[in-house]
Image (spheres, coloured by chain):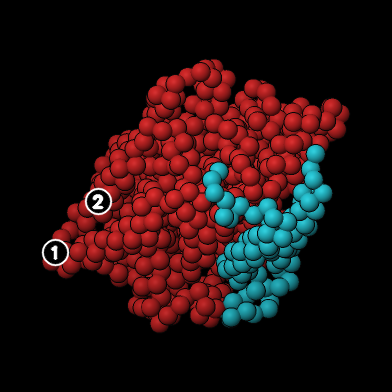
Chain colours: A cyan, B red
């Protein structure tokens, strides 16, 4: 059975996963559900929907992964499950 | 951490020297060109020099150890694994066909950009760190151990085979196309030359050879993609095109309105004798198509590619090679960063290519000019001769209209440097880049297939007592056999490069996505559930592909879910089947529950002991 510490670690990990998935869903699909509407808006001179599919969402994904990984490493450290200074496999 | 070997410590230095060496080679070729060396010789030198380097890396990384052969010794540093994954990921299609696809397909086609990047968020959050903790050699190894039983392992191997084999034929096809063009040999010969080069990078050292040659291939392909983009945009006065081309995109929209976007009917094309595979521009560059159906088509394609990304075994297995769970996770971020560098430049390349042909104030413009003048341009002559571009004066006015200019998608990447008047050395560089992209992906895929058969079928099911020598011999023999089979099929040219690539994603997501995710995130998932998920997804997806596929039954798709998006059907069936069957069967025992608990924390030993 999982120890209470493991349970708490997993609960925190799961919340982070859900937040990340919501962000992913927003930049991967929701934005483009409104492509027609937002394309009238200009960003850096580009039509916004065009910009999002050409660069914006891609940048969001990169930032999202690094952000989420930092949060996850903090969670792992907090519960003492980090493997960064592990001696061996 | 165990003592880092000298080799690992020296990696930045080694690849730094390699990069300088490659740039030096590029400069040398540029110099030879000014001294009168022919275009053909430059192309041959570029392609053969780079293949030679990869082969040397493959040979230097040879190994006789199982851990090194399957997992590159689990010592690939984060950033280098990111580069190797990026090369593994970006296929010949990404390199050669993507900018062309954007050029012709506009906004809707750009769903591929989002689809082929966003999936890494899923890989990072849902999969990579947990699979690394598991310590598996292959993706079916995870399925077989988490759910238990040879049959579940076999189902995973089956999905892997179907998805990866579809994909690898497309890559060998691309390798053949590029090799045949650069070396001036027939396509069928190019395919076999490509295969031999691919095997040289993988056979002797398995994952270890593939890893270090993929890093080298990434460096070549990213240089080869970015140099022409930046060079051309500098010529037009944009220092950093990604930030400053908003005005250009707007100008293209104005020019489209001025020239008129007309879609030619198939009858007109036939009457004018336009070669198959060539098209004229008829989709707006930056406009979003109207209506909910158009939005759904975009979203469904992006979703298929994203979920497919997170299910493709040749990508997931790259994260088995990092030293720790944390480094596997970080490595996903670096992978996406390196991929992003190319993907966010592809639309810029399409934009540059278009503005140069359309804008009458630029010397390179051809649309709206006299056809006799256009036909006299050197690059138009060259590419017309090989039937890659075509001019048809449909309205007989002697002026080239937008709908009278036809070209193949690949031409956008391959010919744009010539259009812009860049020296030929750039074209040689682009050929080397395209070859690197196709070879690195083919290597990853072949290895995924051969490893699944040698490890999961031969070692785990047929002969668990096999010696190390026997296991590695089988693995290597399989690489050759599968490579030859793929090359044989590629030489028959059954599908276009892109059709087959999208199918691989759909197959993978239909069969593997839910069994992998739920195996980690849902303790209640059982063996029978996983088997139902894999088979249900695979069978329903395949059936639907046959139902709507244009070369098969060609029925009207449901809700716009066509043959590129059949994974939506497969993955939905897979999820329902897996959840229902899991709930109907007994929960897995304490040992499996313990395994899942262990899998969820980064610290501690790997789950599988080899």
Residue visible at 36% across and 67% down in the picture: B227
Q: Quadrant of residue B153?
A: top right
Q: Nearer the viewer, residue B560 or A81?
A: A81
| Tag count | 2
Tag 2, which chain?
Answer: B
Residue B532 on image: x %, y %: 75, 29
**Residue that carries the numbered disc 2 in the rendered image:** B49
Residue visible at 63% across and 45% down in the picture: B604
Note whether B226 is above or below B309 in the view shown: below
State left or right for residue B592 relative to residue B316. Answer: right
The answer, for residue B143, to whether it is visible in the render is: yes
Q: Assign a secondary structure to mark 1.
A: loop
**Residue that carries the numbered disc 1 in the rendered image:** B36
| Mark linked to residue B311 | none
Tag 1, which chain?
Answer: B
Residue B167 on image: x %, y %: 51, 40
Q: Nearer the viewer, residue B132 or B289?
A: B132
Viewer-side label of 2, 1: 2
Q: Assign a secondary structure to mark 2.
A: helix
Residue A7 on image: x %, y %: 80, 49
Q: Quadrant of residue B538?
A: top right
- The Cα–Cα distance between marks 2 and 1, rounded to whole angstroms, is 20 Å
The crowd level at tag 1 (other Cα within 10 Å; few <14, some 14-19, many 20+) is few
State left or right for residue A16 relative to residue B13. Answer: right
Q: Quadrant of the C terminus of chain B?
A: top right
Residue visible at 30% across and 69% down in the picture: B422
Residue B479 on image: x %, y %: 41, 30
Residue visible at 72% across and 63% down in the picture: A23
The answer, for residue B301, to whether it is visible in the render is: no
């Amino acid at each position: 059975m999982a120890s209470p510490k493991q349970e708490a670690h997993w609960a925190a990990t799961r919340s982070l996963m859900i937040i990340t998935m919501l962000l992913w869903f927003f930049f991967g699909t929701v934005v483009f559900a409104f492509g027609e509407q937002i394309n009238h808006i200009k960003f850096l001179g580009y039509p916004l929907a065009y910009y999002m599919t050409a660069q914006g969402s891609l940048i969001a994904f990169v930032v999202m992964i690094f952000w989420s990984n930092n949060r996850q490493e903090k969670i792992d450290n907090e519960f003492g499950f980090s493997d960064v200074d592990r001696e061996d496999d | 951490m165990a003592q880092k070997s000298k080799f690992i410590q020296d990696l930045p230095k080694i690849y730094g020297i390699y990069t300088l060496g490659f740039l030096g080679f590029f400069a040398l070729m540029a110099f030879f060109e000014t001294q009168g060396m022919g275009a053909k010789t430059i192309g041959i030198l570029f392609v053969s020099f780079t293949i030679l380097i990869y082969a040397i890396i493959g040979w230097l990384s040879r190994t006789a150890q199982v851990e090194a052969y399957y997992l590159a010794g689990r010592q690939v540093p984060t950033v280098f694994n990111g580069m190797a994954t990026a090369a593994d990921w970006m296929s010949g299609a990404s390199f050669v066909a993507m900018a062309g696809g954007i050029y012709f397909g506009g906004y809707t086609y750009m769903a591929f950009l989002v689809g082929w990047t966003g999936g890494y968020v899923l890989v990072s959050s849902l999969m990579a760190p947990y699979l690394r903790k598991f310590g598996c050699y292959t993706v079916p190894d995870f399925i077989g151990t988490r759910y238990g039983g040879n049959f579940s392992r076999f189902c995973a191997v089956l999905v892997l085979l179907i998805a990866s084999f579809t994909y690898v034929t497309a890559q060998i096809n691309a390798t053949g196309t590029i090799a045949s063009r650069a070396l001036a040999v027939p396509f069928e010969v190019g395919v076999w030359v490509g295969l031999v080069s691919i095997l040289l990078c993988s056979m002797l050292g398995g994952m270890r050879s593939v890893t270090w040659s993929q890093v080298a291939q990434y460096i070549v392909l990213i240089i080869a993609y970015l140099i022409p983009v930046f060079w051309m945009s500098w010529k037009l006065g944009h220092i950093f095109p990604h930030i400053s081309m908003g005005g250009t995109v707007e100008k293209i929209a104005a020019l489209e309105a001025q020239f008129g976007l007309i879609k030619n009917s198939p009858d007109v094309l036939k009457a004018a004798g336009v070669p198959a595979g060539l098209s004229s521009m008829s989709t707006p560059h930056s406009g979003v198509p109207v209506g909910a159906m158009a939005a759904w088509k975009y979203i469904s394609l992006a979703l298929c590619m994203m979920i497919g990304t997170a299910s493709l075994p040749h990508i997931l297995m790259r994260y088995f090679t990092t030293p720790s769970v944390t480094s596997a996770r970080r490595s996903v971020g670096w992978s996406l960063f390196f991929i992003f560098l190319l993907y966010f430049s592809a639309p810029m390349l399409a934009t540059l290519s278009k503005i140069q042909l359309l804008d009458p104030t630029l010397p390179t413009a051809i649309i709206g000019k006299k056809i006799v003048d256009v036909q006299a341009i050197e690059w138009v002559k060259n590419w017309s001769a090989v039937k890659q571009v075509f001019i048809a004066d449909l309205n007989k006015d002697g002026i080239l209209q937008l709908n009278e200019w036809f070209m193949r998608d690949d031409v956008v990447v391959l010919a744009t440097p010539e259009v812009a008047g860049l020296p030929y050395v750039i074209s040689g560089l682009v050929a080397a880049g395209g070859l690197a992209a196709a070879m690195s992906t083919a290597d990853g895929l072949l290895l995924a297939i051969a490893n699944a058969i040698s490890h999961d079928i031969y070692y785990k099911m047929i002969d668990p007592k096999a010696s190390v020598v026997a296991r590695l011999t089988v693995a290597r023999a399989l690489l050759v056999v599968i490579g030859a089979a793929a090359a044989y099929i590629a030489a028959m040219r059954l599908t276009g490069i892109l059709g087959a690539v999208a199918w691989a994603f759909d197959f993978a997501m239909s069969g593997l996505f839910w069994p992998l995710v739920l195996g980690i995130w849902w303790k209640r998932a059982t063996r029978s559930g996983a088997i139902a998920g894999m088979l249900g997804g695979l069978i329903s997806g395949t059936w639907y592909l046959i139902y709507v596929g244009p070369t098969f039954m060609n029925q009207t798709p449901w809700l716009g879910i066509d043959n590129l998006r059949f994974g939506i059907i497969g993955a939905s069936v897979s999820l329902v089947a897996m959840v229902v069957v899991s709930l109907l069967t007994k929960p897995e025992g304490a040992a499996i529950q313990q395994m899942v608990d262990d899998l969820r924390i980064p610290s501690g030993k790997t789950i599988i002991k080899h």
